[in-house]
């Protein structure tokens, strides 16, 4: 089902206004846009801007060369979001920019993509590509790219950028369309009506169209369907956009009237033009605040379609947690309705209190009245207005935990500030609609504001803002409401600056004089504006030793990905008679399945496929892993919530999806044991998976002896880690096509086509040579398409086999999130002994890993976890790891499986030790970083002399990041600021990488062009790019001067399981280098064959070129194809990666919001095969890690069914959550004899470095708790606390203290009473 939350499908819509003779261009989410609403519009896609045949647009070229596209699935949408902003900026009245640039500003460029999601890049290079178009950008601040050389001057850099000429831009609205009047659609052919007047609208609503039970829907932008998933198909649609009264927007000193169909974007633009309209000082204040707040609603491409009225109606009818509803409530807004009795006017507050509007009542417009300016010296009255929101993302595309709008009329009196009148509106906190805190308003009205009055008012706020049962984080939301009122009113209290201890710092102070002053504006605005702009620095060294290997070349196909030409599975045109499938899954954790009933009213359903449809000789197998298989479908018993029960096959994807949403599964829970939903229950029931001995890590040292040597001990401390969803941009997808002779061709988005091939053949009971699995590229994977893609491919093939027709399955995001499984949750209990110096002498861990219902790849987890944990010298290390079998969806591999958790566990233990010793955490880390001897003891002598770079990396990073200087500055900041606290952390990683056997095949064609096939899959990690470079290098050993020409001739093609066998699994970060090694082996064979011929031709002709050599080889029947199978030697199969990061954050104690101020990374890539690709992997992995540690709340219900299963509720990082300053150095550590051309991997290890952000956040929270301790307002230790993962706003504020504001005021009251 569509959500409109990712931006991958953004296109440009252009409309023409014949009266104004003006084209309007705006971006929209195509998945939300109804086709009939585009009548008379022109649509521009990324391919319409430029393409490989006609030439790429400057946007495409800059995205490609700034390395801003990895898997490429999100890139066309990114390009169109930016292009929309570019086009509109160039229409503006700003001065003409220099040649090659646009009128867009760097800030506008970043904001244009703020709603688009990308899981791969980390956003920094995307931002740089966009900012490169801004005339006022500092060219020196733009990041690494393929255009510039190191010593290029500013002028040279500008000249090398692909030219952009706004006067020769793409024609977004062709001339021929302008001459064609956009006539209404034929209502006999299309159920679509577009009334042009109120009278016609009324006639439609009360005519035969809506009589006799016919269903209809009023539409404007249809964006509500992204939140409320509709299963109903309507008989008629009534488009309200052409009714003039509904599209008005006017304003003057008396107020603003906005029609219901005005889009949120247009309303914001109108509010920003207040300088051109005489709104008066009150109107200016209101319009500025509204515009600033509303720019945080949804994303630009949603705001461009979403209407103000639609948003309000969703709030009134459905309880949508709307910001606009709260803002308008806080401004005494009134509304006009068209009812069956005529036009009715009432306040917005009254409408909210009424029952939900019926389908024939239409919201026409909203009026925001303006207060008359009261700036006379007699009244000394002033207006205060401000708005508030705190959300999982600070800028865009996230619903607020609480939003608020406050309006106050205040004046100066002899004893302080008098509140003449006040309105406090709150919304989104867990009620049906926005409400006013009337008891608080009554209490404050006509009172002189002081600390005591404020303190008592805040007590009432807590009683007024009470979320309904079932609301997430209810105490946090109530506390947030208190913080908002405090922030609004505290600057007006009669607190004197003589109070010591920095109590006044951190709030935007507005003094009593500001309020009582005789300025003419009569209004006060408190500024809290945040900037989005980010900056970064990249340091990397390329090596020409193995040219072109080592060159920072742009990713293969990046421009093609940007233009939208890159073909993913779902881009393959559907064959004739193609059907579509969707999964029905269990919503119960353990229950018998008695039957499935489909809604008979849904058209197009062809069949329902269950385990009963598996052919004779086949097997109910959906995946085969290390030592067991997983059922494709539940049989009579569903064993977890989210288990696949059936596939509905229909003639369209929409019909299939709707059928599954409305399907009723009849369950039987009688005589069935209670499900095992926790690891504790699994232990009680002895429900475990076996860990093969070769995958179980070795213990180190004597734990008892180490504990005996310790000065201090921590016994049986506990921590827990939750799950995480992969959030690949392309969900699981497959196309299965029956072929001749009982064969099947399957196109799948998979990291493991070879195993998918085997599973499909097993399920269908066919020999494997009847199955052909093809994977060209994957739109993101992160481990989620290793095993979890297999059942999708198999179910699709089974449906195609049974129905003898092509079938495709594109799993919708909601279902994908539920059935995927995600990262492994775990419970860890540890005991640790340590010296007074901080040196740890012994560590024991009891680790319970929740593996879910089937084995999947869970047996590899312990090895990754312990290997990552061993980055510190623990003295003696003992552990007991159990894989718990529970009635949860099968947990699976996810970027750094086990390693991420192990790295966090290590840091949590180090921080616990530091807190008990009252030592700096960094000192304890340094005390326990490995020596060369200890690291070889812990990892089995795999680090050669001179290759242990971690200590030098730590030292170098301390200098380059100014770590110690910033730590001191940070202490001073925290002493001076009450409401903002900062923390900084330096963290090392050690990552144990493991190579796998991989095939390679190189073929030289008649014209000398070269085709390369490898077992590794291109999933965005740049595998094809590195392989291409390796092929060119290896073949250039015949003649080194041919390297550049050979590079142009190499094409890496899709994986085909009947062409290259034993392809294996693309995972573990090392498949790129293994594939390169396999290709090098193949090339070595070809070089051996061709070198003698080249020498012979040289002797005959004096010189020879590549085409001549290949032509002669063809004539002499020299074999020009070579296969290889790279099997790493046992001694070099495993190696260590090193890196370190310093991160600094700032937390807002009032809201719990964390801002990452700066992250600095140094990462050892050995001798990088492609520094640009590795840089992208480092940045992308780090930001992915920020998601796990800080953002991504994985929520389930009481049956462990995932409920945060949409872009609305699951929040991966966006451009506004990455570090404001992001600096990365790719360290070239020289020769590593046993590595592939001395290279090391980069795909997963940097994700572990993101724990530095969590550690820094913990340090900032500790500073807040120390402040409470200073006030004598904290029970217990300031440093001994556990900050959960992810450290979302509610958790950060909870650890700071949900009653922090009240304690602050109590201090003031106590000080006042003693004076």
Image (cartoon, helix red, strand yellow):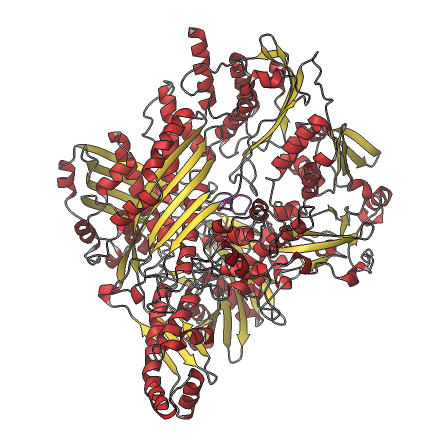
Eyeballing the image, is 817 above or below 571?
above
- Residue drawn at (38%, 45%) of the image: 1160
Q: Quadrant of residue 1062?
A: bottom left
Q: How many marks?
A: 0
Q: Is residue 685 visible?
A: no
Location of the C terminus by quadrant is top left
Question: Horizontally, is 825 left or right of 465 in the view?
Answer: left
User: Is residue 1194 found left or right of 807 in the rendered image?
Assistant: left
| Of residues 248 and 1016, the one drawn nearer to the viewer in this rendering | 248
Whether residue 99 appears in this view of the structure is yes
Residue 1125: percent from the left, percent from the top?
33, 74
Of the pair 1165 and 1181, the residue shown nearer to us: 1165
User: Main SS type for the magenta part?
Assistant: loop
Where in the figure is residue 963, as x and y percent of width and height?
33, 39
Q: Quadrant of residue 1024?
A: bottom left
955 in relation to 1073, above or below? above
Q: Is residue 282 magenta?
A: no
The residue range painted magenta reads 1203-1216
Residue 361, position as x, y percentages in the image? 77, 38
Name the residue: 22% across, 54% down.
Answer: 939
Q: List x then y, in percent, for residue 286.
A: 67, 30
| Residue 1204 inside the magenta-drawn segment | yes
| Left or right of residue 885, residue 665 in this image | right
Who is closer to the viewer here, 1166 or 235?
Answer: 1166
Q: Could you tell me which residue is drawn at 53 percent across and 42 percent down?
A: 532
For residue 1014, above or below residue 12: below
């Amino acid at each position: 089902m569509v959500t409109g939350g990712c931006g991958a499908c953004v296109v440009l819509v252009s409309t023409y206004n014949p009266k104004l003779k003006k084209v309007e261009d705006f971006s929209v989410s195509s998945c939300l846009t109804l086709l009939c609403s585009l009548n008379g519009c022109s649509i521009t896609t990324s391919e319409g801007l430029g393409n490989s045949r006609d030439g790429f647009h400057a946007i495409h070229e800059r995205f490609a060369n700034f390395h801003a596209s990895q898997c490429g699935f999100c890139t066309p949408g990114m390009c169109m979001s930016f292009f929309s902003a570019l086009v509109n900026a160039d229409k503006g009245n700003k001065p003409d920019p220099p040649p090659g640039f646009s009128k867009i500003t760097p800030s506008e460029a970043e904001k244009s993509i703020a709603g688009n999601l990308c899981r791969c890049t980390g956003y920094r290079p995307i931002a740089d590509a966009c900012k490169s178009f801004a005339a006022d950008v500092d060219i020196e601040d733009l990041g690494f790219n393929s255009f510039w050389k190191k010593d290029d001057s500013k002028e040279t850099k500008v000249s090398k950028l692909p030219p952009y000429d706004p006067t020769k831009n793409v024609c977004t609205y062709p001339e021929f369309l302008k001459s064609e009047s956009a006539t209404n659609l034929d209502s006999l052919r299309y159920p679509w009506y577009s009334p042009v007047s109120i009278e016609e609208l009324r006639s439609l609503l009360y005519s035969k169209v809506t009589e006799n039970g016919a269903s209809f829907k009023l539409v404007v932008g249809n964006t509500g369907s992204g939140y409320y998933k509709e299963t109903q198909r309507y008989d008629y649609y009534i488009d309200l956009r052409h009714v003039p009264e509904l599209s008005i927007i006017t304003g003057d000193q008396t107020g603003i009237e906005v029609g219901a169909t005005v889009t949120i974007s247009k309303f914001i633009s109108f509010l920003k033009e207040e300088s051109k309209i005489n709104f008066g000082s009150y109107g200016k204040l209101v319009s500025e605040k509204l515009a600033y707040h509303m720019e945080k609603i949804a994303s630009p491409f949603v705001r461009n379609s979403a209407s103000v009225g639609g948003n309000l109606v969703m709030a009134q009818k459905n309880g949508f947690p709307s910001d606009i509803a709260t803002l308008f409530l806080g401004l005494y807004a009134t509304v006009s309705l068209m009812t069956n009795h005529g036009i009715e006017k009432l306040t917005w507050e009254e409408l909210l209190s009424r029952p939900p509007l019926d389908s024939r009542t239409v919201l026409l417009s909203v009026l925001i009245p303006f207060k008359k300016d009261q700036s006379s010296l007699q009244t000394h009255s002033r207006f205060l207005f401000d708005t508030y929101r705190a959300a999982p993302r600070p800028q865009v595309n996230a619903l607020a935990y609480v939003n608020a709008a406050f309006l106050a009329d205040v004046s100066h009196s002899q004893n302080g500030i008098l509140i003449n009148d006040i309105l406090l509106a709150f919304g989104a906190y867990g009620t049906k609609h926005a409400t006013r805190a009337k008891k608080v308003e009554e209490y404050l009205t006509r009172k002189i504001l002081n600390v005591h009055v404020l303190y008592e008012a805040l007590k009432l706020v807590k009683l007024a803002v009470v979320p309904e049962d079932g609301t997430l984080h209810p105490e946090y939301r109530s506390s947030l409401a208190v913080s908002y009122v405090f922030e609004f009113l505290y600057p007006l209290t009669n607190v004197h600056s003589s109070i010591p201890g920095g109590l006044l710092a951190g709030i935007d102070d507005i003094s009593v004089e500001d309020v009582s002053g005789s300025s003419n504006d009569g209004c006060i605005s408190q500024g809290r504006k945040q900037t989005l702009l980010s900056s970064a620095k990249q340091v990397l060294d390329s090596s020409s030793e193995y040219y072109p290997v080592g060159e920072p070349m742009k990713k293969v196909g990046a421009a093609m990905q940007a233009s939208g030409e890159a073909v993913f599975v779902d881009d393959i045109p559907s064959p004739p008679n193609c059907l579509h499938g969707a999964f029905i899954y269990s919503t119960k954790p353990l229950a018998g399945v008695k039957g499935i009933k489909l809604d008979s009213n849904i058209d197009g359903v062809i069949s329902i496929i269950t385990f009963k449809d598996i052919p004779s000789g086949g097997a109910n197998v959906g995946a085969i892993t290390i030592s067991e298989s997983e059922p494709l479908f539940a049989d009579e018993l569903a064993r977890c919530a989210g288990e696949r029960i059936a596939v509905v096959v229909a003639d369209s994807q929409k019909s299939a999806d709707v059928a599954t949403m409305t399907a009723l599964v009849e369950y039987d829970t009688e005589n069935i044991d209670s499900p095992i939903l926790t690891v504790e229950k699994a232990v009680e029931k002895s429900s475990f998976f076996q860990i093969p001995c070769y995958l179980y890590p070795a213990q180190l040292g004597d734990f008892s002896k180490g504990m005996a040597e310790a000065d201090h001990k921590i016994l049986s401390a506990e921590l827990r880690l939750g799950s995480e969803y992969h959030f690949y941009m392309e969900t699981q997808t497959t196309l299965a096509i029956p072929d001749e002779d009982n064969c099947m061709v399957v196109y799948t988005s998979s990291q493991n086509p070879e195993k998918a091939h085997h599973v499909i053949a097993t399920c269908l009971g066919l020999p494997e040579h009847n199955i052909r699995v093809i994977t060209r590229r994957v739109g993101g994977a992160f481990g989620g398409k290793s095993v979890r893609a297999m059942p999708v491919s198999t179910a699709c093939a089974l449906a195609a086999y049974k129905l003898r027709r092509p079938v495709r399955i594109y799993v919708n995001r909601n279902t994908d999130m539920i059935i995927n499984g995600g990262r492994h949750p775990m419970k860890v209990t540890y005991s640790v002994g340590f010296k007074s110096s901080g040196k740890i002498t012994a560590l024991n861990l009891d680790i319970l890993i929740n593996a879910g219902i089937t084995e999947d790849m869970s047996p590899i987890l312990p090895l990754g976890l312990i290997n990552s944990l061993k980055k510190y010298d623990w003295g003696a290390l003992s552990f007991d790891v159990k894989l718990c079998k529970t009635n949860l969806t099968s947990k699976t591999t996810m970027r750094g499986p086990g390693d991420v958790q192990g790295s966090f566990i290590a840091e949590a233990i180090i921080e616990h030790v530091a807190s008990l010793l009252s030592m700096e955490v960094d000192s304890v880390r340094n005390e326990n970083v490995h020596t060369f001897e200890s690291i070889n003891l812990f990892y089995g002598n795999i680090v050669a002399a001179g290759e242990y770079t971690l200590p030098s990396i730590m030292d170098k990073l301390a200098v380059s990041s100014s770590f110690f200087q910033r730590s001191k500055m940070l202490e001073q900041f925290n002493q001076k600021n009450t409401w903002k606290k900062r923390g900084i952390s330096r963290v090392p990683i050690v990552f144990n990488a493991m190579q796998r056997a991989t095939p390679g095949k190189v073929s030289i064609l008649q014209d000398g062009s070269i085709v390369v096939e490898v077992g590794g899959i291109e999933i965005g990690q740049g595998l094809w790019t590195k392989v291409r470079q390796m092929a060119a290098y290896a073949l250039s050993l015949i003649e080194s001067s041919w390297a550049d020409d050979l590079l142009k001739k190499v094409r890496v093609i899709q994986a085909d399981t009947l062409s290259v066998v034993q392809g294996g699994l693309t995972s573990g970060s090392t498949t790129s280098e293994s594939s390169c090694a396999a290709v090098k082996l193949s090339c070595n064979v070809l070089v051996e064959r061709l070198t003698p011929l080249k020498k012979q031709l040289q002797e005959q002709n004096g010189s020879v070129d590549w085409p001549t050599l290949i032509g002669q080889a063809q004539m002499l029947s020299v074999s020009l194809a070579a296969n290889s199978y790279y099997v790493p030697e046992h001694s070099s199969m495993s190696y260590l990666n090193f890196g370190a990061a310093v991160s600094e954050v700032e937390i807002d104690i009032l809201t719990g919001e964390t801002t990452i101020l700066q992250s600095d990374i140094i990462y050892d890539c050995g001798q990088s095969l492609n520094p640009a690709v590795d840089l992208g992997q480092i940045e992308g992995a780090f930001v992915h890690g920020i998601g796990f540690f800080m953002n991504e709340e994985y929520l389930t219900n009481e049956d462990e069914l995932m409920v945060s299963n949409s872009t609305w509720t699951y929040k991966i990082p966006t451009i506004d959550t990455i570090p404001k300053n992001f600096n990365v150095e790719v360290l070239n550590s020289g020769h590593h004899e046993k590595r592939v051309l001395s290279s090391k991997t980069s795909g997963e290890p940097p994700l572990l470095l993101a724990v530095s952000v969590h550690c820094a956040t913990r340090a900032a929270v500790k500073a807040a708790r120390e402040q409470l301790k200073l006030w004598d307002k904290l029970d217990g230790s300031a440093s001994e606390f556990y900050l959960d993962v992810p450290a979302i706003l509610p958790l950060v504020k909870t650890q700071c203290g949900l009653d922090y504001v009240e304690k602050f005021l109590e201090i003031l009251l106590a000080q006042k009473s003693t004076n």
